[in-house]
Image (cartoon, helix red, strand yellow):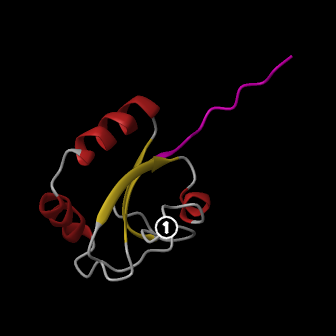
Amino acid sequence: MMQIQFQSAYYVYVVTDHHRQSLSVGITTNLAQRRDSLVAGLSHLVYYERYTGAKETILRESRLQCYSQRKLRKLVTRKNPGLLFLDPVGSSELS
């Protein structure tokens, strides 16, 4: 009998480049694993939100992807003013 695994957490995240010039939005169920396979050049996690449902996570990601870089930067800097690079493993949640 096949077992189905349900995820208990979903994340919308924002990553940036080393110079903090460009921001990109994505979703994952594992922040630490996702960090290791990010788009080349955009590998620094600067923001994330945790959700319990896949649907709400996808809706939030879709909304954030419509944001301009300026609006996205404003959202991120409210929780992470210095755009510090975050370590998702063992770090406290930002939202």
Residue at the spot of label 1: 40
Considering every residue shown, the one lying at the far front of the view is: 40
Q: Is residue 17 left or right of residue 34?
A: left
Along the viewing direction, whichever of 95 and 33 lies nearer the viewer: 33
Q: Is residue 80 above or below residue 94?
A: below
Give the image location of residue 11, x and y in percent: 45, 49
Q: Who's the residue at 51% across and 61% down the image?
A: 38
Whether residue 70 is in magenta: the answer is no
Question: Tag 1's secondary structure?
Answer: loop
Q: Quadrant of the C terminus?
A: bottom left
Give the image location of residue 84, x and y in percent: 35, 80
Along the viewing direction, whichever of 66 and 61 lies nearer the viewer: 66
Which amino acid type corresponds to the residue marked 1 in the rendered image? Answer: Ala
Residue 80 sits in which quadrant?
Answer: bottom left
Give the image location of residue 60, x and y in percent: 30, 40
Considering every residue shown, the one lying at the far top of the view is: 1
Please provide the residue range marked out in magenta: 1-10
